[in-house]
């Protein structure tokens, strides 16, 4: 069965040369090869303001520059969400995007005296988080709190599920990070294995 897939690339660097970009591209290539329809949203290339009040969240309009992203999410059967771990959390730009996008009326319907109605029931998702440290360290020592929050408080609250996760560690800290600040990086062979895995997941549409 073919699926409609929207990829949310959450890295805030618009140059797009990071391993998370390559993982998303590999997934998209696999999905298209299997006949799935794919749309990609590059959050770093969007222009939108910060959300600054609860009044705006509940009663304001979604910025015009984000309406195509909302359309792509609404259209999708499945979401692939990719972002790097920064300070143990989502990058600020990506979090600001989610705050603007997942508003009442879009992700949930607020009903007086009743529980919110989840508007995205039936959609599924996979979250890919890249990080410089070992992935088990983030999951077991730190508790993967930001990942859990994204799954429960944003995606799950709107009805999306099941939500699968893929953690990719040992990537180092990127340009400008002091030598020795992170453990040894993934080898070329290990990176290829990850790219092949994401290509296979894309073919499966999961």
Image (tube, helix red, strand yellow):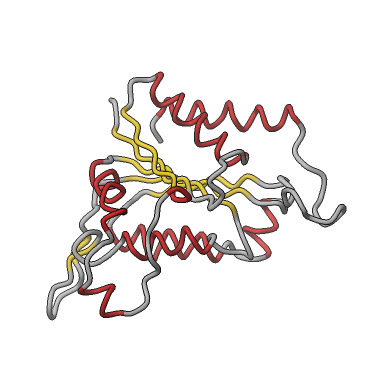
Is residue 172 found left or right of 158 in the rendered image? right
Q: In terms of depth relative to the viewer, which is nearer, 170 or 161?
A: 170
Q: Relative to residue 55, is residue 107 depicted above or below?
A: above
Is residue 187 found left or right of 20 in the rendered image? right
Q: In terms of depth relative to the viewer, which is nearer, 125 or 42?
A: 42
Residue 116 % position (x, y): 20, 69
Residue 97 picture quarter: bottom left
Residue under the point 40% across and 26% down: 31
The quarter of the image holding the C terminus is top left
Residue under the point 26% across and 56% down: 64
Residue 192 % position (x, y): 66, 27
Residue 38 % position (x, y): 35, 32
Residue 177 % position (x, y): 78, 55
Residue under the point 47% across and 45% down: 9
Is residue 152 found left or right of 4 in the rendered image? right
Outermost residue to the left: 112
Q: Relative to residue 197, is residue 108 depicted above or below?
A: below
Number of labels in the image equals 0
Residue under the point 28% across and 56% down: 159
The quarter of the image holding the N terminus is top left
Outermost residue to the right: 180
């Amino acid at each position: 069965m073919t699926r409609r897939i929207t990829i949310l690339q959450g890295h805030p660097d618009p140059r797009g040369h990071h391993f998370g970009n390559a993982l998303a591209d590999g997934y998209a290539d696999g999905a298209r090869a299997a006949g799935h329809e794919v749309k990609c949203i590059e959050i770093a290339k969007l222009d939108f303001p910060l959300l600054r009040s609860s009044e705006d969240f509940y009663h304001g309009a979604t910025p015009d520059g984000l309406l195509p992203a909302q359309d792509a999410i609404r259209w999708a059967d499945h979401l692939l969400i990719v972002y790097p771990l920064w300070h143990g959390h989502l990058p600020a730009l990506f979090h600001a995007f989610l705050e603007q996008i997942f508003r009442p009326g879009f992700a949930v319907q607020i009903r007086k005296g009743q529980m919110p109605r989840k508007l995205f029931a039936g959609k599924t998702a996979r979250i890919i988080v890249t990080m410089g440290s070992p992935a088990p360290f983030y999951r077991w020592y730190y508790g993967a709190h930001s990942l859990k929050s994204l799954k429960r408080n944003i995606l799950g609250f709107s009805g999306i599920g099941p939500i699968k996760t893929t953690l990719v560690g040992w990537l180092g800290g990127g340009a400008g990070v002091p030598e020795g600040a992170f453990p040894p990086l993934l080898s070329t062979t290990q990176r290829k294995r990850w790219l092949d895995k994401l290509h296979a997941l894309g073919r499966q549409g999961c």
